[in-house]
Structure formats: C-alpha cells, structure tokens
Image (cartoon, rainbow, N blue to C red):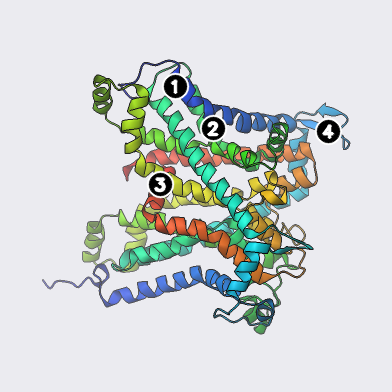
Amino acid sequence: MERKVVYPQKLLPYLLLAPQIAITLVFFFWPAGQAIWMSTLLQDPLGFSVQFVGLENFEAVLKDPAYVATLQRTFLFSFGVTALAMIPALLLAVMVDRVVRGATAYRTILVVPYAIAPAVAGALWLFLFQPSIGTIAYPLRLFGIDWNPRIDGTDAMIVVVIASAWKQIGYNFLFFLAGLQSIPKSLLEAAAIDGASEVRRFWTIVFPLLSPTTFFLLVINITYAFFDTFGVIHAVTQGGPGKSTEVLIYKAWYDGLIAQDLGRSSAQAVILMVIVIGLTVIQFRYVERRVHY
Amino acid sequence: MTSRVLPSLKPGPHTLIPHLVVAIGIAITAFPLWVAFVASTLSNPEIAQAPMPLLPGNQAVANYGEALVQGGRSGRILTPPVWEMMLNSTVMALTIAVGKIIISILSAYAVVFFRFPFRMAFFWMIFITLMLPVEVRIVPTIQVITNLNMMNSYAGLTIPLIASATATLLFRQFFMTIPDELVEAAQIDGAGPMKFFRDILLPLSVTNIAALFVILFLYGWNQYLWPLLIGTDARMQTIVIGMSKMIDSAGGPTDWNMVMATAILALLPPVIVVVLMQRWFVKGLVETEK
C-alpha cells in the first residue's frame, strides 16, 4: 500500500529517520552482529587467544545435557504458563460476555496485574508461598503437604508458573472478550432455536469462531513465557533450587555474565534469536489473515 | 407452534452463575495484592506468627516512611531510599515513553509521506529490530554501552531502549489511512512538510499517542534485565530491581513488611496509569498487536 500524494523534499526524510536509524545501528545491529560473530569463536579461559571454530559452539551447546535439560524445562514452563494464563481467561471472558451489567468494572480489575512488573508479581506470590509464614503455604502445611520452594524444585516451578500466568490472564481476557463480542448474536440465536444446548453452541459455534484469537494469543503467550519472565525467575528463585527453574533466557544470561563463557553464551543467544524470528514470522503471517474483523 | 424460551440469551436469573464465576476470578486476581497490602501495614513479628492476619495493621505509616526515607535491608547493607529508586524509575519510564513516541512518529512520517532512495530498506531495518530483543544480545550490548561510557547513566538506561519497531509500525499504519485529499489541500494552501506535520498530522495522532504512552510507560517502568545490566551502581537502581534485592534468595531473613511496602510502591504508578487511562490502554494493546 502506497500513498499517492507525497512531499518532494529529498534531504528532510533522511533527517527525520536519522535518530531511529542511528540507535538501531549502534544498539541493535552492531551487538546482534557481534553475537553472531562471537558464536563462531573459541576464547581460551584467560582471553589471550581467540580461534575461529565455525559451528562448534553450537554443536557443543546442543549436545550439552545441561542445555537440553534447560530446553525441556523451558517448554514445560511455557506450556504451564500458557495454559494457566489462557484457560481461566477464556472462562472469565465467556462469563463476562453474558453479563450485561458490571462488565467494565470487571475488566478494570482483571487487567490490573498486567500493569505490574514480572519481578513484583513474582515477589507477591513468593510471599504467599513462603514455607513458614505464607498465607497459602500455611494451610498447605496444616494439610500435611511438605511445601518448600526453596528446597523442592517442583514447588519452585509451581510458584514461578503461577506468578507468570497471573500477570497475563487480564491480557488474554481482553482479547477473548473482544473476540466473543464480535461473534454475531444472530448465529447463536439461530442455533438456540434449532435446539442446540448452551454447551453445544459453545463448542460448535463460539470456539471455532474464536480460533484466530486463540491462535494469536497462543503465540503471544509463548513469546511472553520465553522472553519476558526473566524478572520473575531472577527475583523469585534465581533459577534454583539447583537448576530446577532455569529457563533458556536465564541460562544465556548466567553463562554470559556470571560464568563468562562468551562463545557458548553467544551460541545460545543466536539460538534464541532464531526462536524469536520464528515466533515473529508466525505472528505476522497470521495477522494478515486476521483482517476480517 | 409454541415459542421456545431461550433463557441463556437473555439477562435474567441465569446471570447468577456468570457473576459468581467472575467474582471468584476477581478474588483470585486481587488476593495477592490484598495480602501484600496487609503485610505492608504490619510489623515483622506480626507477619512471622503464622497465620498472618488478613486485616491491615497499624504500622503503615512507619513501614512506608522507613522504606521511602531509609530503604530496605538487602543482605547486610541497605538499598538506597525507595523515593530515590522511584525517581530513577520515573525518569526511565518517562524518557523511554516520550523518546520512543518522538523518534518513531518522525520516522513513520518520513517513510509514509516522502519518496527517496532506500526508503524500504530503512523501513525493514526498523522492522527487524522486533526480532532482536535485549535478551538475545546481552553480552555484546554491554560491551557497546561500556565503550560509549554509558554504564550507570540515565542515557545508558534509556537511549538504547528508545528505538523499537512497534511504535513506528503503529504510526505508519495510521498515516496510511490519512486521505490523500487532506495532504493535497494542505499543499495547495502552501503548507510545507513540517507545517503539515505540526498542524495537521500531530493533532490527528493524539489518541494514538495517548494509547502508546500508556503501553510504553508500563514497558519502561517494568524493565528488569536492562537496568540490572546497566544500572549496577546502587544509586542508579530502579524500584523494581531494588525490591527484588530486598528478598534474600539464599533463604536468610527477609523483612517482608519492607519488601511488600516497596512492592506496593513499585506497582502503584503503572496500575494508576492503566486504570485512569483505561480506554487508551485497551486501544494501545489492540493496535500495537496488529
């Protein structure tokens, strides 16, 4: 799509673009290029000699059992966050769609957690789940559940999944509600007159018509779980206990800055880049087809 | 033929279940916030004697005062006073939001309303930044910041985050919908490109700017990895980072009343912005994802 009427100036557009292009080159393209270049180098531990090793860093990373374990953990974490953030959101949206009064007030409250920083969300849930004093941990102990996210990896994972999902429910809710409200009421009325029960109407009409929204949210939530939950993990568990809550982003940060293994950390960064590119391409290709509403 | 009753399509007693489910949803949403608020008004011994009371205590003034003026305990040292960290967060959030809006509205204007060599190449350069978040280029970015002497400065905290594709894409999309007749009329009246931008395009963009502002303010205020990397000096800490440092991750003693008071202070500004500017916030969410 192009405009027909434009301004003829030749120099002005470059001046207008200059600030953004300058920042993009210095802080995006240069470091990204460096990351790709460094991923092909092997540095000796003291940093005296550097050697070009091609794809060996990638081979080393992908064959490393610790990396594979982190990859699997990241999938588990992302699946948990996505499911826990989307299913309750859909349920709430279906319910709010049916009430006439109070929908706006409900929306306001449900969307509040979206405004909260991931690390703060993590701190709130960590406090509820603190072994000896937490408001949720206390009754768990009364029921005889030996709960301690500081020691038990599964408990720690549960806390970071809940905190990450809690933050995202309001966002999903907004999009599901918008999707539901765009479904023509006449369709539902026709099905009701034909005698379709409420549950049947949901699965045969509402849910299929919502599928573009659902797919879109799936991509957004997976991206969120992969890349935006660093704050939750860093503030709540620091990847621990052991490595039980270490996800890909956390490992790339840890290996690069704490363990200072530049080659392997860069290889991890490049793998992450490929994942982002994949998710972005899916999102944009799909958006073109979403135009009908 | 008898007409059937279609209760579920009409409001009536049937809406009881929806209200109930939504009430439970809201309770779950609000519960952590309520507990955090209550904890921020209690003394530490009151929190430690489980179960913690679920009604506010009388330590609110003492706790918030101590956090704001003195800071909280982080291991053996104190964090900077929370008001200083809030100031850092405010500077960061506002600079990022305003800076992003300015540079992206200018570049969208250039790309849409002019024809010049490499126009699409520039557009793609901006678009590709979507695929290069900080998280995937941590180490080399720090090297660049160090070389430019921007560690522990407001410039380092904000300028690198000011470029992004989302805002440019949004403005570009909006500018495409401006009718050609409007531009022609302006040109016939002798309006040059900057006058057209200032007197026509900018006023038309106000709602888009407001929507973006809400989204970008949240983005800037809630940053974590970036200030963690760039603001290593205590006096450059943001409130979100400061709060997380008050939690002893080794499992040692944590002053939970201080942590929760700081958490409340850290979440209040973005929550207030979202609630007050809700209409623009929803618009911003929907538009930036298109």
Q: Circle 2 — which element? A: helix
Q: Which mark is residue B128?
A: 2
Picture quarter containing residue B229? top right
The x and y percentages for residue A43 are 83, 33
The x and y percentages for residue A58 are 74, 37
Question: Label 4 belongs to which residue?
Answer: A43
Q: Circle 1 — which element? A: helix
Residue A289 or residue B194, whichever sits in front: B194
Question: Label 3 belongs to which residue?
Answer: B211
Q: Neighbour class for label 3 at 10 Å: few (<14), some, many (≥20)?
A: many
**Residue B40 visible in rendering:** no
**Three-letter code for the amino acid on which mark 4 is drawn:** Gln
Question: Label 1 belongs to which residue?
Answer: A13
Q: Chain of mark 4?
A: A
**Three-letter code for the amino acid on which mark 1 is drawn:** Pro
- Do the residues marked 1 and 4 share a common chain? yes
Q: At 48% across and 59% down in the image, what residue appears?
A: B271
Mark 2 in CB contact with mark 4 (< 8 angstroms): no
Picture quarter containing residue B38? bottom right
Q: At 49% across and 68% down in the image, what residue appears?
A: B29
